[in-house]
Image (tube, coloured by chain):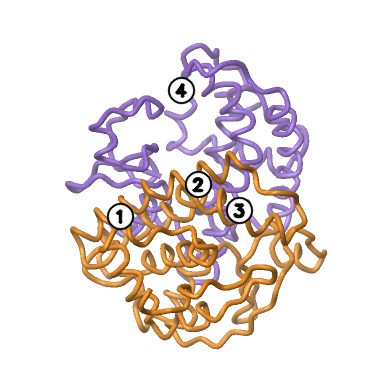
Chain colours: A orange, B purple
Amino acid sequence: MLAEKRIDVELIEERYWEPSTEFLRRNPAGKVPVLKIDGMNLSDSQAICEYLEETVPDPALMPADPATRAEVRRLIAWFDDKFHHEVTRNLVYERVNKKIMRGGYPDGRSVKAGAANIKFHLRYMEWLLDHRRWLAGDRMSLADFTAAAHLSCLDYISDVDWNLSPSVKDWYATMKSRPAFRSILADQIPGFIQPPHYANLDF
Amino acid sequence: MLAEKRIDVELIEERYWEPSTEFLRRNPAGKVPVLKIDGMNLSDSQAICEYLEETVPDPALMPADPATRAEVRRLIAWFDDKFHHEVTRNLVYERVNKKIMRGGYPDGRSVKAGAANIKFHLRYMEWLLDHRRWLAGDRMSLADFTAAAHLSCLDYISDVDWNLSPSVKDWYATMKSRPAFRSILADQIPGFIQPPHYANLDF
């Protein structure tokens, strides 16, 4: 979102699982992301995104009418709450975060559940994209970036079956081609080699 | 929030753990609340609240400036995400929801964790209320209603120690005295007798 709105930002790695007093002062919830902007420390990704939309309205990532705004927010919650707990946590957190945090081996049952759940979610995305141009309606919105954020993490560990739905694959190809996605596709996670298809626009 | 904005609503009990096809059509996430309004089925509580604030702006439950709005949204996420997972789920879901859903007995470790966690959260609320008139700033906001919603559920099962912090107790007494709180204080959960202090404004 920062890149779409052309807000320059310096990324600082935060080991949130070993929080410093300084970090807890910035966000007592002990979670990332935290954004230092306009002399404040903002936290909670949705609160941050709404703030950016209100203070830097151009380009708009939220629609103008309340009904479509509600649909965008419903889908953001879908991905950050439901999809997160059913898929991202079971796959990315088990396979990647645990290793980085030295928290032990992935739990087999969680990984199995995540792998089963992602199919249901890709089908739901397909259903949405067969009825709409973008996830929440006729225009690209924060809902698309929220979904793409989760899927890009999962794609880094090759946990997305892109053959399951051409509609979802086409949508993700468009998201990948956004200039704002460039730095995400250049990400390198220590201990995990980026698979060849990850940054490839023709995957 | 509906009562504060004087929007009449008919409450319909939904056994979301045994979802009907009709209910899943209204909200594929299978969660409550779902609000049928203006010819639509809205879901996700935060998306619903933002919609109500945008379409029925009076009385305002969100501040006008983006920085305070971010603080309100941060605290809403604090209660609906962090507090929910650390406290409400461990106490209310274990003691109440499980019984109603015939899901077995409360898990002792969860209940113990919830009882320990709520103290930390009440202290954090106390710290906020010692620096501000309301949770998110100088004016009552959606953050106060979000917090009061969680605490009223916990208070129904006598899981809030009101002696822990006079600031929090005073704040909750004010919330309880809102006309909008009247129907909440009249709630009766089948199988759980309302404790005498629950609806008492002088508790």
Which residue in the protein does label 2 denote? A114
| Residue at mark 3 to residue at mark 1: CA–CA distance | 22 Å
Q: Residue at x 52, y 45 (%)?
A: B146
| Residue at mark 1 to residue at mark 2: CA–CA distance | 40 Å
Q: Name the chain letter of the residue that bears numbered label 4.
A: B
| Residue at mark 2 to residue at mark 3: CA–CA distance | 40 Å
A135 shown above or below A60 = above
Which residue in the protein does label 4 denote? B187
Label 4–label 3 contact, CB within 8 A: no
Left or right relative to B10: residue B167: right
Q: Name the chain letter of the residue that bears numbered label 1.
A: B
| Residue at mark 4 to residue at mark 1: CA–CA distance | 26 Å
Which residue in the protein does label 1 denote? B56
In this rendering, which labeled residue sits more in front, label 4 or label 3? 4
Q: Residue at x 43, y 74 (%)?
A: A54
Q: Earlier in the sequence, mark 3 or mark 1?
A: 1
Q: Amino acid at mark 4?
A: Asp
Q: Which one is nearer the viewer's eye here, A134 or A177?
A: A177
Which residue in the protein does label 3 denote? B134
Q: Are marks 3 and 1 on the same chain?
A: yes
Q: Amino acid at mark 2?
A: Gly
Report if residue B142 is visible in the image: no
Secondary structure of the residue carrying numbered label 2: helix
In this rendering, which labeled residue sits more in front, label 1 or label 2? 2
Label 4 crowd bin: few (<14), some (14–19), many (20+), radius 10 Å: few
